[in-house]
Amino acid sequence: MKRAGFYAELPTFDRFADVHDASLYVLAPGDWDVVVTDVEGSTTAIEAGRYKDVNALGVASIVALRNALPAFDLPFVFGGDGATVLTPASERDRVHAALRGIRAMAHDAMEMSMRVSMVPVEVLHADGFEVLVARFGASPHASYAMFAGAGLSEAERRIKDPQEGPLHAVGDEGPCEASFEGFECRWEPLESRRGKVVSLLVQATAEDRNEAAQTYRRVLGTLESIVGDSQGRPVGPDNLAIARGGRAFDAEARITSGHGKGVGLFRRKQAIKAQSAFGRFGLSRGKETFGFPADVYRDEVTANTDFRKFDDTLRMVLDVTDAQHESIEAALGELHAQGAIVYGTHVASAALMTCAVTSYRGDHMHFVDGADGGYALAAKQLKRQRAD
């Protein structure tokens, strides 16, 4: 099915180091909306050990919005404790219904509060905050939206502002329906193969777009010289393992069943366990089994992951050696001392991966964050630097 929307027509670029290049971006149409979802109190939840649940809700919101608008190709970015998605204003009724469904599921199944809000792109543009979009081809099968222009940052600021936020929040009245079909969370934590998994956030401080682009070019060049173009990828065929049980399937079972307890949750968890056992069997054989393309799935998962992205902030999850980590911290610290950037990092021994699967052959996307809090805890350091 050919998908509609301006994003469907964008050409892809395939060298991430070019993400700062202004010529790759187009202005989002004014008749679209910036939708923001995030887990309220996510830092507290993460510190209480619920980082997997927080991650899962962020990915689940992407899945639900894509399911609500299957005819459209939607630009989105996963932020660790939530997501930002552009949706056409002509479909607001369906988007509102899905957002209410996301919020209700988070409350009922996960006992968490989910903020769901939107700001029209035309309002941001009128106030001087551009929403610019590019399309990065992570692999022949998966592409991810990149954003620039300060529009997304301004939308998030307004949505989280105590005075302005209620004006943008989706109300309780109206249809409440969300489908989480395709949401999966079945992989064991991706243990570091080099020593450390570093979640990294970087923001250029320059208000001038060209000056900021030069800063990002410098940061990306430095990171590439330390880690290599894609050598820091935290997922590979050698550290992919499907979970076997215990509480590993709790998040997926809760989200896809909509229940936090009871028979519905139990049945869903048992079904996931059975499907996962089938997947492990296929992967152990290394060839297509009963229609499951185990012969190519590991390599496709590796290629399709979103371990690096840009949305007015450079975000990366990198698997690095101790020496590489020290070099990264030193380089970023020097740029911060010069006043060129603010940044945050978080170090863990593993990464977490949550998935959106339309088809096991090609059409599947994988969202990566550092274990134990990743992006959300790195953001604490960045916010402190920005405040200073």
Image (cartoon, rainbow, N blue to C red):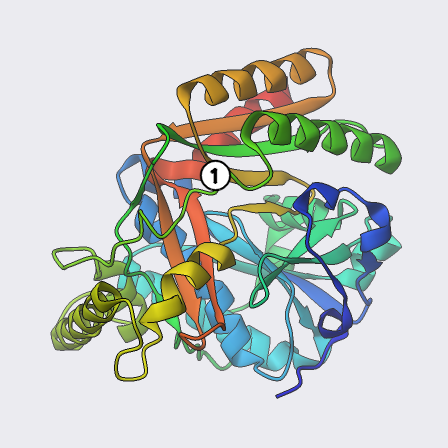
Could you say where residue 312 lies in the image, as x and y percent from the top left?
69, 43
Residue at the far bottom: name it.
1
Q: Is there any visible trace of residue 31 in the rendered image?
A: yes
Quarter-wise, where is residue 41 in the image?
top left
Give the side of residue 7 with respect to residue 271, left or right: right
Residue 13: image location, x then y, percent? 73, 56
Judged from the image, the secondary structure of the residue bearing numbered disc 1 is helix
Tell whether 228 sits left or right of 121.
left
How many numbered circles does the render carry? Answer: 1
Please tell me which residue lies in front, 343 or 104: 343
Q: Which residue is drawn at 64% across and 74% down?
A: 73
Q: Give the answer, above or below, for where 49 lies relative to 58.
A: above
Task: Please provide percent x and percent y for residue 309.
Answer: 60, 47
Residue 112 spot, x, y in % from top left: 34, 54
Q: Quadrant of the N terminus?
A: bottom right
At 16% from the left edge and 74% from the top edge, which residue is drawn?
Answer: 274
Asked if residue 246 is positioned above or below residue 388 in the image, the reply reads below
Q: Measuring 20% from the left and 57% from the top, which residue is drawn there? A: 243
**Is residue 37 in view from this perspective?**
no
- Residue at 83% in and 59% down: 26
134 shown above or below 318: below
Badge 1: few (under 14), some or many (20 or more) residues near its Cα, within 10 Å?
Answer: many
- The answer to whether residue 113 is left or right of residue 324 is left
Reading the image, the residue beneath label 1 is: 375
The one of 159 and 242 positioned closer to us in this rendering? 242
Residue type beneath disc 1: Tyr
| Quarter of the rendering occupied by the C terminus | top right
Give whichever of 322, 358 is nearer the camera.
Answer: 322
Q: Is residue 115 above or below residue 257?
A: above
